[in-house]
Amino acid sequence: MRRVPLVILCALVLVWGAFCTRETVLTLSSSGGESVIVSEDLETMRKVVEATVTRKYEDLPLMDLISKKKVFLVQSGTKVQVQEAHLFGRNAMVRILEGEHADKVGWVPKSMLQ
């Protein structure tokens, strides 16, 4: 009985390792619009995600964050390269590969990666 969960865990580790290595190139994807919010740091990204989930947008001064360069908007469909992603984490650090923000690095939820 104990072997089944261990086998499943090992399979998940292998799949995730293949999916998100440092060299992995993926596409940013937003189901809700044309742009994806990319955050300069994890703390800012957590605030963006929390405001989005709770729909308390008044707690998220987006234009202020953009002017302070804490976040930037990247077009959905933009290619990115994974720089850092933890197996059980929900976030990934990516380098933007094309467009206006090419070569910038920031954090996005893994759910925004295809």
Image (cartoon, rainbow, N blue to C red):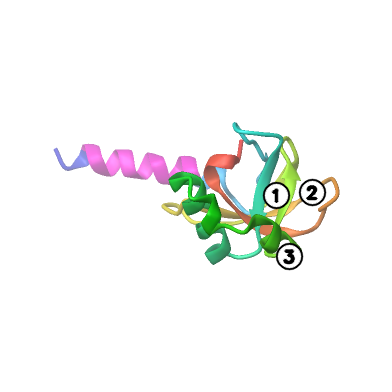
Is label 1 in a helix, a strand or a loop?
strand
Q: Is residue 85 left or right of residue 9?
A: right
- State the residue lying farthest toward the left: 1
Of badges 3 and 1, the one in the foreground is 3
Residue 21: x %, y % from top left: 59, 50
Tell me the quarter of the image containing the C terminus.
Answer: top right
Q: How many marks?
A: 3
Q: Amino acid at mark 1?
A: Gln
Asked whether, in this view, residue 8 is left or right of residue 73, the answer is left
Q: Which residue is mark 3?
A: 69
**Looking at the rendered structure, which numbered label has been put on residue 43?**
none
Which residue is most to the front? 58
Q: Earlier in the sequence, mark 1 or mark 2?
A: 1
The reply to whether residue 23 is in sight is: no
CB contact under 8 Å: marks 3 and 1:
no
Q: Residues within 10 Å of mark 1 (few under 14, many from 20)?
A: many
Among the 4 quarters of the image, the one containing residue 72: bottom right
| Viewer-proximal residue among 113 and 74 | 74
For badge 3, the amino acid type reads Lys
For the residue pair 93 and 49, the one nearer the viewer reads as: 49
What secondary structure predominates along the stretch shown in magenta?
Answer: helix
Q: Picture coordinates of residue 70 (x, y %)?
A: 68, 64
The first of marks 3 and 2 along the sequence is 3
Query: Picture coordinates of residue 33 (x, y %)?
Result: 66, 34
Disc 1 to disc 2: CB gap under 8 Å: yes
Span of residues in magenta: 4-16
Location of residue 113 (image quadrant): top right
